[in-house]
Structures are given as structure tokens and as C-alpha cells.
Image (cartoon, rainbow, N blue to C red):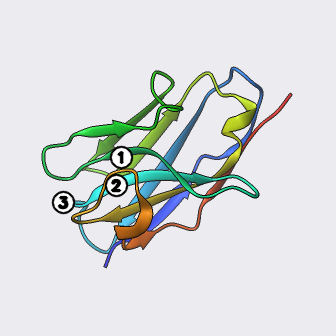
Amino acid sequence: QLYLVESGGGLVQPGGSLRLSCVASGEPLGAHAIAWFRQAPGKEREGVACLSGGDGSIYYSDSAKGRFTISRDDAKNTVFLQMNSLKPEDTAVYYCAGGLGVVPLMDELYDYWGQGTQVTVSS
């Protein structure tokens, strides 16, 4: 069983940066893929970034490429999402999710989810 807790959300101006953290407990991240998803009001949940547990491959959505960076600190059992050049359309609740045998940016096969952290980009 993997337990995930996100933190680091908040209010930021357009063009600003935030770093989200996802701390895992219960078992080592090990072979689990860890991904960040987001859901804005009235919209479907979408995958933003994924770091696979096997070969460490990284995947980004088109909206995240060039602005967001996903990384992992195994010693701290933590995955980070560095978000730069934030835009109002990045406003959403951000969730981290973990699973095995997943499709990187599709949420159906992820077994473990955090409670989410709110990111609001506004002037």
C-alpha cells in the first residue's frame, strides 16, 4: 500500500513558479510510476507529468513541456513537480498518483492517489 501526500500549492502570479512535493509512505517508491495529474473546475482530470519506476522515463503533456519538471528523491521517497512560467490556465487541483503497469498520463490504472493541492495562478 502506497500513501501519497501532496504539498506546495498556493497562489502565484502569472509567470511565477511553484514546486509541488509528493511524499510517499507505506512502501518505497521502487518500481512504481509516479505521476502528477490536475483537474480544473468543470474539466476532466488530465495527466501533466509522469516518471516511470522502471527505466526512469519521463513523460510530459504538451501543456507542461518546457515549463514543468518532474523529479524524484528516493532517499526522501518524494517526487517533485517544479512548475515555471505559470499561466492562469494552470489553475487546478494537482494530484500525485502511483501505480504499476500504468499508461503514463492516463489515470485509469493508477492505484494510489493523494488528496490534492490547489494551485491558483492569478494576478
Quadrant of the rendering where the C terminus is positioned = top right
Residue 36: x and y in percent read 46, 50
Q: Amino acid at mark 3?
A: Gly
> Cβ–Cβ below 8 Å for labels 3 and 2?
no
User: In this view of the protein, which residue sits in the foreground, 45 or 30?
Assistant: 45
Viewer-proximal residue among 69 and 80: 69
Which residue carries the number 3 mark? 30
State how far apart marks 2 and 1 are (Cα). 6 Å
What amino acid type is highlighted by mark number 1? Cys
Up-down relation of residue 25 to residue 30 (above or below): below
The residue at the point 24 percent across, 61 percent down is: 32
Within-10-Å neighbours for mark 2: few <14, some 14–19, many 20+: many
Q: Badge 3: how crowded within 10 Å, few (<14), some, or many (20+)?
A: few
Q: Which residue is mark 1?
A: 50
In percent of width and height, residue 60 lies at: 40, 36
Residue 42, position in %: x, y?
Answer: 75, 58
Q: CA distance from mark 3 to mark 2?
A: 10 Å
Is the N terminus in the top left, top right, bottom left or bottom right quadrant?
A: bottom left
Tag 1: Cα neighbours inside 10 Å, few (<14), some, or many (≥20)?
Answer: many
Q: Amino acid at mark 2?
A: Ile
Where residue 81 sits in the image (x, y, percent)? 47, 40
- Mark closest to the chain's N terminus, 2 or 1: 2
| Discs 3/2, front | 2
Q: Quadrant of residue 71?
A: top left
Residue at 30 percent of width and 56 percent of height? 103
Position above or below: 114 against 65? below
Q: Which residue is mark 2?
A: 34
Name the residue rendered at 35%, 63% in the picture.
98
- Residue at disc 2, secondary structure: strand
Report how far apart the C-alphas of labels 3 and 1 lie in the structure. Answer: 14 Å
Q: State whether residue 114 is above or below residue 58.
A: below
